[in-house]
């Protein structure tokens, strides 16, 4: 196991190299430059700015210099946020996005497992149909529609939560709930399908034959097997929650990393876009590694190494 984990972590290096390289060249081939939206400036001023940010050499020279800086952990200065380094911006915004994502992840996983299991136990009943209809609605409606509706009813009309902001627990619950809804629905549908297959297996029939209650059979015996597809989905789900939080962060005015990532693309902020991409890619690889390790604890038949 330790050797396998070490190999996977080492694989992160070539993956990040490819991702950083692709990000660098894709941003460069887009029309315009980081200063094209500014007012018309003298050629000497623009030349000085390009030199300041190491953008005055050939494309290959810029690329090799950037890769060298990234290898040392220097993500350079942002091109749009004056005198702020990408390292500083990420250090300030990443913890906020991680807290929001973690809350949404826990909400989505807990709600999805419970709802999917209950729907499977009550297969073809009105409860099953109602729960799956709500799950379909949650998957179909995007966050930029759900968030304003929740704000209107829960914050403006009923005053249960603050409208926006970040810092206290009551400010975290509503955006995390809004972010978790489509993922909770996906987990519920996946859990229902897996649980239905598991409930028809021989070991479940044996547990029922011993006289165990239905809830005990489901949550003590069947759940450990039925949850495996959900565990597989957890890695991509966690990454999607982090990368998909930008809409929620913008609506609720949360100082996370999402809005900076969007603005870096719109403003052609090469270095900020590259830095945020590195963080997202690293999290995706590490989260998938965690999922692979969890498999060995949930199913003893699986061995990795």
Image (cartoon, rainbow, N blue to C red):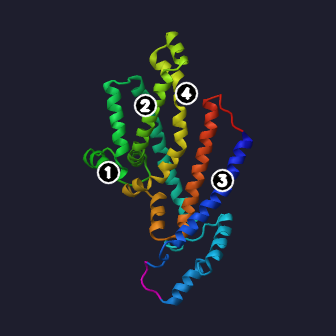
Dot 4 surroundings within 10 Å: few (below 14), some, or many (20 or more)?
A: some
Q: Is residue 210 magenta?
A: no
Q: Which residue is mark 2?
A: 116
Measure how far apart labels 4 and 1 are at the Cα level: 36 Å
User: Where is residue 120, by image quadrant?
Assistant: top left
The location of residue 180, given as percent across then percent down, is 42, 44
Toward the viewer: 209 or 177? Answer: 209
User: Where is residue 90, by image quadrant?
Assistant: bottom right
Q: Is residue 112 above or below residue 169?
A: above
Asked if marks 4 and 2 touch (Cβ < 8 Å), the reply is: no
Q: Is residue 114 above or below residue 265?
A: above
Toward the viewer: 67 or 229? Answer: 229
Secondary structure found at label 2: helix
Q: Is residue 266 above or below residue 292?
A: below
Tell me the tag on residue 225: 4
Dot 1 surroundings within 10 Å: few (below 14), some, or many (20 or more)?
A: few
Mark closest to the chain's N terminus, 4 or 1 = 1
């Amino acid at each position: 196991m330790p050797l396998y984990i070490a190999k996977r972590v080492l694989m992160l290096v070539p993956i990040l190299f490819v991702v950083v390289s692709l990000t660098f060249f894709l941003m460069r081939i887009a029309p315009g430059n980081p200063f094209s939206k500014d007012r018309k400036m003298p050629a000497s001023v623009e030349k000085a700015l390009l030199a300041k940010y190491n953008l005055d050499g050939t494309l290959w020279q810029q690329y090799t210099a950037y890769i060298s800086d990234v290898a040392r952990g220097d993500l350079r200065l942002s091109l749009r946020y004056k005198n702020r380094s990408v390292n500083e911006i990420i250090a300030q915004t990443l913890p906020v996005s991680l807290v929001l994502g973690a809350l949404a992840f826990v909400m989505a996983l807990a709600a999805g497992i419970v709802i999917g299991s209950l729907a499977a136990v009550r297969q073809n009943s009105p409860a099953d149909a109602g729960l799956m209809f709500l799950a379909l609605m949650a998957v179909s409606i995007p966050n930029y529609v759900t968030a304003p509706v929740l704000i209107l009813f829960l914050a403006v009309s009923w005053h249960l939560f603050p409208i926006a902001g970040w810092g206290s627990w009551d400010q975290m619950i509503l955006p995390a709930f809004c972010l978790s809804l489509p993922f909770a629905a996906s987990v519920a549908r996946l859990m229902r399908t897996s649980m239905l297959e598991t409930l028809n297996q021989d070991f479940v029939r044996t547990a029922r034959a011993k006289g165990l209650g239905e809830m005990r059979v489901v949550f003590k015996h069947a759940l450990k097997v039925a949850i495996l597809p959900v565990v597989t989905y957890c890695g991509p789900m966690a990454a999607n929650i982090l990368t998909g939080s930008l809409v929620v962060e913008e609506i609720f005015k949360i100082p996370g990393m999402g809005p900076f990532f969007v603005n870096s693309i719109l403003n052609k902020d090469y270095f900020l876009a590259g830095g945020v991409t590195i963080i997202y890619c690293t999290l995706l690889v590490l989260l998938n590694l965690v999922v692979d390790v969890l498999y060995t604890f949930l199913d003893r038949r699986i061995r990795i190494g």
